[in-house]
Image: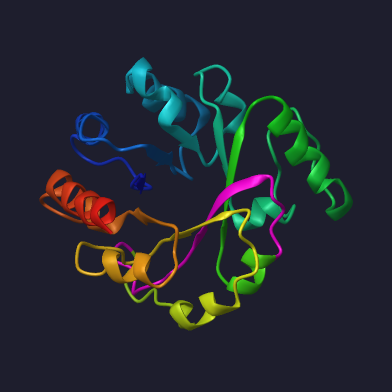
Amino acid sequence: MIIISNPISVPNEINDIHSLFAEGLMLFHVRKPDFSEAEMKAFLSEIGLEFRSRLVLHSQHHLAEEFGIKRIHFTEKMRNGVINTPARFSKPSRSSENKIFNELREKGFHLSTSVHSMEDFNTLNDVFEYAFLSPVFDSISKPNYASKTNHFEAIIQRTNFSTKLVALGGISPDNIQQTLKYGFDKAALLGTIWNSNNPIENFKLCQQIAHSF
């Protein structure tokens, strides 16, 4: 099971993260797009050392080695070379993208990314272990954010089986079984955790359903 952080700071966040790990959370994506380097360092420092291997950085990639993090996520824009990649690399062109990703893999990093269509997913390089496809359902965390595509129909066109396909967007205990039944390899939770009064219970229920599928 994968959980993505709330993009902003929320009360009791670190305690909840530790509780989620204690309940068996395997991967926690740190997505704090507006955090400064100092804010990101402070946030990462609060997470227990024993859990650092389960963290995935969405930004401030250059901090990964300092904090013993071996997982890096590339947004769609980053993957396409629209914005800067980690500081130790130059801004990529289309011809240099694979070299950059391969270099990171050679350094022992695990890479993931995001897509919004099955067509884009099918073109991904196999350096990416998994990719989020979103939004599958109407978003819980983003009002009025819904997919214009029926991803359950589009998944029939899947040709990329080297990269795991992870459903994101509106995933909850009510629909996670349907999501896995129709061909997604995994599911990621965001709004059902951070927009809930019972984040740990929601996680446990989703995890139980996923494990029994």
Chief secondary structure of the magenta span?
A: loop
Inspect this view and state whether residue 99 appears.
yes
Outermost residue toward the front in this view: 212
Question: Residue 61's x, y, as percent?
Answer: 59, 32
Residue 104: % across, % down:
70, 32
Q: Quadrant of residue 80?
A: bottom right
144 relative to 18, above or below: below
- In the picture provided, is 21 more to the left or to the right than 182? left
Above or below — where is 17 with respect to 52?
below
The residue that appears at 72% across and 55% down in the rendered structure is: 82
Q: Is residue 87 visible?
A: no
In the image, is 178 to the left or to the right of 200? right
Q: Residue at x 11, y 49 (%)?
A: 198
**In the picture, residue 117 is in which quadrant?**
bottom right
- Bounds of the magenta span? 123-141
Question: In which quadrant of the rendered image does the C terminus lie?
Answer: bottom left
Left or right: where does residue 65 sit relative to residue 100? left
Residue at image position (31%, 67%) is 170
The x, y position of residue 106, in whole percent, is 73, 28
